Image (cartoon, coloured by chain):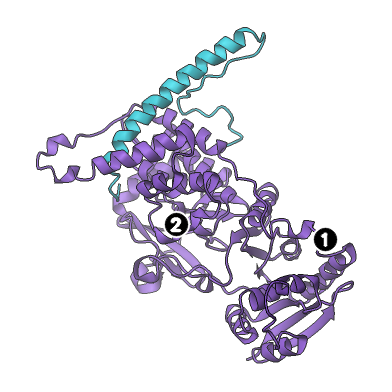
Chain colours: A purple, B cyan
Amino acid sequence: MMVKQKMMMNSDGIREYGSFRDPAGRVYWVGDSVYREVNSLYFEQYDKLMESGLYDELVKFHALIPHEEVYRDEKYITIRPQVIPFISYPYEWSFGELKDAALVTLKIHRRAMKHGMILKDATAYNIQFVNGYATLIDTLSFDNYTDGDAWGAYGQFCRHFLAPLLLMAYKDFTLNRLLMLFIDGIPLDLATSLLSGKGGMFARQHIIWHSRSVQRHNSDGKNKNKDSVKRISITKKQHLALIDSLIRGVESLKFPHKDTEWGTYYSNTNYDDSSIRSKKEILNRYLDKIQPGTVWDMGANDGTFSSIAVSKGAYTVAFDLDPVAVESNYDQVRINHSTMLPLVLDLTNPSPSIGFANRERRSISNRQRPDCLLALAIIHHLAISNNLPFDMIAEWFSSLSDCLIIEFVPKEDSQVKLLLATRRDIFPDYSVEGFEASFLNYYSIVEKEHIQGSKRILYHMKKRN
Amino acid sequence: MYFDPGTGSLIIQVIVAGLAVLAGYFGIIKGRFLGFFKKGKKNDDAINDGETKDDDEL
């Protein structure tokens, strides 16, 4: 149904600050709805996307976010895309998530060529995860394709996807965090230096040779003889062969197997069966009472307990510091297509706001206010391993959500003994009494229960007014 | 395009795209050679023209 009243970004909406580079349109918010304003200079491409069958095919495969056209006149079209439950960024993704984001970008581009169109950009920020599907959210990313056109976004694709994937596969799986420092992807000369020759012919072509070519032609635009900067073209056959070879190359990249401290936490004998069952049963009851629509699990590990929130109908963001655990969790989510989003996050150094004016990509605190936080088996890591006082933890948690389910792990617990085994115990206030005294400054305790077979206590807390 | 694709990126693209075509031809030749010894097995072309073989996947 068409809304007759035209919605103007400037008068009705709040601009989405991360949407400014492409003059084809702008994104803005009105209440909880997001709108994309399409300029008349892009009408031709938009209509071709919609009428060629490309839009329907991509939506069918969950590759493009669906939208509703709500207004159209000779100057503007306004569309209302489906809202993404939680915006995440490539420096928070696991290896598998970044790989799937790269593959969907390439496959969308390949399918677009079948309809006489191409992707005009290949930024990782155009991809979001919706129920385990990597999905393009920028409906205006498509442009007309003419035989002979090279892929203008190839350089961007290599910086945003190939460089971090190769670094994660061949050097260290945390190196996608470099994307936080480099807003338009990892520079190819840096990636070349860090790879140190690893990555085979795939890296050699798309990173090393590519980097040399970029450096060699950096000053071409300064050449006053404009004829020397010629139009570069490749045939359609070459173009498709390039895309297919990129797809094969990305598909061949593997997450390097490595044992990490927390990668298989719940597979180890930290809990016996009765403790796990008891913890799950208590969590089930708390969640049945709270009925949250959105949950953040702050130390989700492989999603064992996040899955309980999902089973209650909550959209759950499952954060963990350990990339191996997040990868394991994502392996399940991409099969089950559940309403869970696993992400890598260091609670002691969470994602900040970055980009122009520090507003382009939002900090964790500014993206969503979840109905409930889960803080299971993490308090001792924060307080003891990271020397964080209880009241600072409570203050931050209470700023994120009004509801908290938190597990207190006492000093008698084997995990805490392990943490204190090689250091002085400088934590006189680390006790149930100290924990409750600090958290009661910010929360009231709705209920608490001991987990059977352990000395741990599971709390349900509600933020004080 | 709303950003500079970079001359260096476009030039290297010509080279790697050409290599990709060659790799595709070698793949076809290899497939036909191996297929000669495997009766009843079809050889898939390594290069397609944008038509996906299976409309059940992207």
Q: What residue is disc 1 on?
A: A269
What label sits on residue A98 in the rendered view?
none
Front residue of A9 and A299: A299
Q: What residue is disc 2 on?
A: A179
At label 2, the amino acid type is: Leu
Q: What chain does mark 1 sit on?
A: A
Q: Which residue is found at the position 54% from the left and 60% from the top? A: A84
Q: What chain does mark 2 sit on?
A: A
Q: Position of residue A278 (x, y in %)?
A: 87, 70
Front residue of A258 and A279: A258
At label 1, the amino acid type is: Thr
- Quadrant into which the C terminus of chain A falls: bottom right
Which label's residue is closer to the chain start, 2 or 1?
A: 2
Front residue of A413 and A401: A413
Marks 2 and 1 close (CB-CB < 8 Å): no
Q: Position of residue A395 (x, y in %)?
A: 59, 84
Q: Which residue is found at the position 69% from the left and 66% from the top? A: A314
